[in-house]
Image (tube, grey):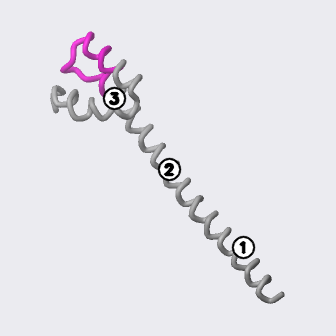
Amino acid sequence: MLIAMQFIFFLADAADNAAGTLFGIGTFGLILAILASVFWIWMLIDALTNKALDSTMKIIWAVVIFFLHILGALIYFFVGRKTQTRV
């Protein structure tokens, strides 16, 4: 009977640790998703307000960023922003 009680306590402790681990992964994922969304919105606004781009390029970049989400935002960040003039 004592071994069974110890086993039950062991399982309860393991469940607590698993829930804590899953909560930590979920929290990290949520923070990562929020940061990715903020970055995506920032790049979309930047593409639409980039004075170095003509109207056609702004529309193309906006469509690329909109449909490819984070991948499109990363492509614009490394490729499209280089044409923007810094003041």
Which residue position is annotated with label 3?
72
Residue type beneath disc 3: Gly
Q: Percent x, y for residue 11?
A: 70, 73
Q: Which mark is residue 29?
A: 2
Q: Residue drawn 25% across and 15% down?
A: 57
The residues colored magenta run 46-62
Residue type beneath disc 2: Gly
Label 3 neighbourhood size at 10 Å, few (<14), some (14-19), many (20+)? some
Front in this rendered view, residue 5 or 17 = 5
- Provide the secondary structure element on which disc 2 rests: helix
Q: Residue 65 sits in which quadrant?
A: top left
- Point out the tag, 1 or 3, that comes first from the N-terminus: 1
Which residue position is annotated with label 1?
12
Q: Percent x, y for residue 58?
A: 28, 17
Residue type beneath disc 1: Ala
Relative to 6, is 71 above or below? Answer: above
